[in-house]
Image (cartoon, grey):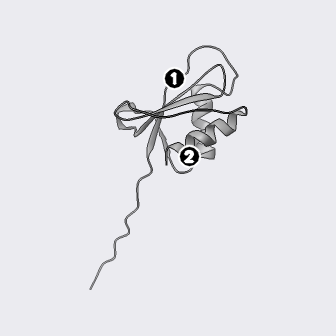
């Protein structure tokens, strides 16, 4: 008798760097994490920086972001006029 195993590919994990300072209420760490979970189903949001494949640093003052890999290398820098569009751009970069 043969057994068939299903292998699922684990989604990349992203750590959202804590956002300091003022800014739009959506541009909080929890706000960014929430939007990523809603709009970016290809990644898993984690609060364990050591287990993250990516680190997302999102600005508190606007809709700008930078993404680093787990080695600290810059992967993408981006921005958008509309907040959720910046989240979507970040999501595409982390596939």
- Within-10-Å neighbours for mark 1: few <14, some 14–19, many 20+: some
Q: Residues within 10 Å of mark 2 (few under 14, many from 20)?
A: few
What x and y, as percent, mark residue 14?
46, 38
| Residue 45 pos. (x, y %) | 50, 40
The residue sitting at 60% across, 41% down in the picture is 89
Badge number at residue 18: 1
Give residue 35's position: percent from left, percent from top. 63, 38
Q: Is residue 54 left or right of residue 26?
A: left
Could you say which is closer to the camera, residue 29 or residue 12?
12
Q: Is residue 83 above or below residue 93?
A: above
Residues at circles 1 and 2 in contact by the CB criterion of under 8 Å = no
Of the numbered discs 1 and 2, the one sitting upstream in the chain is: 1
Provide the residue designation for mark 2.
92
- Which tag is nearer the camera, tag 1 or tag 2? 2
The structure residue drawn at horizontal position 67% and vertical position 18%, both measured from the top left corner, is: 23
Q: Position of residue 30 (x, y in %)?
A: 59, 30
């Amino acid at each position: 008798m043969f057994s068939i195993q299903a292998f699922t590919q684990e989604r990349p994990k992203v750590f959202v760097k804590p956002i300091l300072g003022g800014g739009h209420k959506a541009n909080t760490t929890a706000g960014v994490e929430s939007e990523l979970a809603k709009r970016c189903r290809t990644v898993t949001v984690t609060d364990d920086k050591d287990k993250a494949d990516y680190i997302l640093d999102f600005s508190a003052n606007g809709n700008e972001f930078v993404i680093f890999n787990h080695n600290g290398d810059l992967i993408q820098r981006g921005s958008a006029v509309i907040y959720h569009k910046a989240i979507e751009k970040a999501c595409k970069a982390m596939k």
